[in-house]
Image: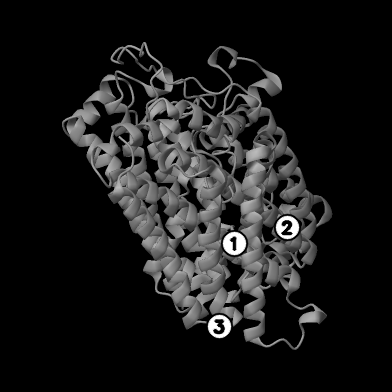
Amino acid sequence: MGWGTVDIVLFVISIIISAGIGIYHSVKGIRATPSEYMLGDRGFSPLPLAASLTVGTISALTILGNAGEVYTHGTQIWMMDIGVVAGMVVVAKYFVPIFYPLKMVSLYQYVEKRFKSSVLRQATAILTLIGAYLFLGFLIYPPAIILQASTGLSIHANMFIMGTTCTAYAAFGGVKAVVYADVFQSVVMLVGILTIVIQGTVLVGGLDNVWEIGFQKDRVEFFNLSLDPYERHSLWLVIILGFFFTLNTYGVTQSQMQRAFSTGSIRQSQKVMYYGAVGLVVIRGLTNLSGLVIFANFVDCDPLTSLNLKKPGLVVLSYVLQKLTIIPGLAGLFVAAIYSAVLSSVSTQVNSMTALIWEDFLKGKKCFEGWSPVKIGHLQKCIVAVSGVVGILMGFLAESFSTLMEAVLSILGVFAGPMVGLFLVAVFLPWVNIKGASFGFVSASIFSMWIGVSIMMGTPPKFLPLSVEGCPPPPTTNTTTTTPNITTTTTTLLDDAATTSVLNITDISTTTPPVLPEEEASAGGFNGLYQMSYCLNSMWSTLIFISVAIVVTVIWGGNSPEDLDERLVDAGAWRLFTQTVPRLRKEGFRSLLPQRKPTISKRAPGGGEGTTGGVEEEQLQHLNPNSAQMLNVSVEGTRKDMIDT
């Protein structure tokens, strides 16, 4: 069955509402100042910002990728959310109290304040902008192909509709339009994912049967406690993946920290992070569950095998076309969820990119001196519009040069570790100055690119067993049906644009990070390094950044307390810093070692009674009991020998 009237109506309504939110806030805020346009004049309450924070990183390919991951590799990736929650706590407790009081628009203003380097600030901003523009094409193009199979619209038409809609409401309405549209889209996404879970559960006879089938076919695994770094997933590996993913995405990325800056206090900003963590766990959990539900429905007739689909995420589309179209409206809700995921991610990107372009590169230029706040607000709207157009063009480029796009996005994605390392050093290591930070950033970036490119060239991981025993026999006539069209229209998608896991900037997917086959995992040297789980990539590059920064600081010297503003670092780190540096300057590194108090001898002249023959009582007290006893025995024995003599 194909789309019906109800599906089309629901789909169109979702687009109209998203665009209408932008039009409303455009009219309402036609004379908005830059602060109102970029931050909503810091007047948001935590809940809508938390919803925007959540859906801003749940792209269409996250929905497809996580479901496909559980379908082909099991539920171990679900435990990644433990690391996600831990990372959000770190961001809320340690990063927000430092960043928020600075009243910044661009997160990278902190980099300049902390390291006193506008060059480092602009370098991080440029890197973020390049990745964000490429990411726009990555967000728009692959879902457009998926939606082509569902809606019948051409790829270009889907890209144009998605790009134009989100650019329009982001440009005209500013951050208020983006945030409130995200709230609506979060509801649509939630309903769309629930359609898969509820309908699929009903078709297999209940949720108990879903889990039972998963257990029987080895899809359910949560506590793989293996410490082997060459396994693709274990409990520890996915927790590490989730932790560093969260630090990068929510702690050191402009698009998400801008949400935290839009509240009225530090406490409210922290609530945004905590509420956002809950939203992420819920939506990611339902997405993972949808993968298990889809597997239960296809347990005896796997479409990846029977239709020769090459990427796990495409199993979701096969499920939608085969199962959801049974009930009018369900397919429309799911496609609306895909559109909502794209709109929320793209609008978040173009809004944050505008903030970076204005704050880090244009603000303060002589040509803008004397401009009124309203005039600056109009300029920012133009920047958003231009960014949206560039995003649509990048989608077209992704269609023509998808293999190149995959390589470029893979290389850019590995900068997640260095960015996390930069901010961890800035917050927790006040000793480190611009020299240590620069050397650390360059070293970690080179390492990350090297490992990222090497892993990208590896062999994709093998799927868990899939069955086609229950599939009907192939047709004997040349009949055109809806389902076989999946092969021709969707195999192209992730075959040509398999970029879902290569970006840790604002999204993460779990379907494509490749590792080498198990039979080659015993190779030594650099091959062994390449074959480690992709979950460790960000951690390695972060540790390299920190290590190099510390070594350079020790060799060339670092900051003194008078060189640094106390507000720019963690309070505990500052106390340690102020206590340690003066002692180092006065006494050197020995001052940091534990010192033993000098002892005073109580020996009487000539070694009279009550002495130990020159062995001080205080010294004996510092010895362990056995050593002291042996020494006393030795002294007494010497006395006896002398008396006998």
Please name the residue that numbered disc 2 is placed on: 126
Q: Amino acid at mark 2?
A: Ile
Q: Residue 64 placed where, x, y %?
A: 43, 39
Q: Within 10 Å of the Cα at label 1, are there few (<14), some (14-19), or many (20+) other Cα atoms? A: many
Q: Is residue 607 visible to the viewer in this orientation of the structure?
A: no
Q: Earlier in the sequence, mark 1 or mark 2?
A: 2
- The reply to whether the C-beta atoms of the residues labelled 3 and 2 are less than 8 Å apart is no
Please name the residue that numbered disc 1 is placed on: 350
Secondary structure of residue under mark 2? helix
Q: Residue 642 placed where, x, y %?
A: 64, 31
Secondary structure of residue under mark 1? helix
- The reply to whether the C-beta atoms of the residues labelled 1 and 2 are less than 8 Å apart is no
Residue at 32% x, 11% y is 473
Residue 282 in the image: above or below residue 642: below
Quarter-of-image position of residue 572: bottom right
Distance between the Cα atoms at labels 3 and 2?
Answer: 27 Å
Q: Earlier in the sequence, mark 1 or mark 3?
A: 3
**Farthest residue, direction left:** 205
Q: Amino acid at mark 1?
A: Val
Q: Within 10 Å of the Cα at label 2, are there few (<14), some (14-19), or many (20+) other Cα atoms? A: some
Q: Earlier in the sequence, mark 3 or mark 2?
A: 3
Please state which of the two labelled residues, at mark 1 or mark 2, is closer to the viewer. 1
Residue 327 in the image: above or below residue 265: above
Secondary structure of residue under mark 3? loop
Q: Within 10 Å of the Cα at label 3, are there few (<14), some (14-19), or many (20+) other Cα atoms? A: many
Q: Residue 422 placed where, x, y %?
A: 67, 54
Residue at 60% x, 66% y is 575
Q: Residue 192 placed where, x, y %?
A: 33, 48
- 594 or 531, nearer to the observer: 531
Please name the residue that numbered disc 3 is placed on: 32
Q: Is residue 295 visible to the viewer in this orientation of the structure?
A: yes
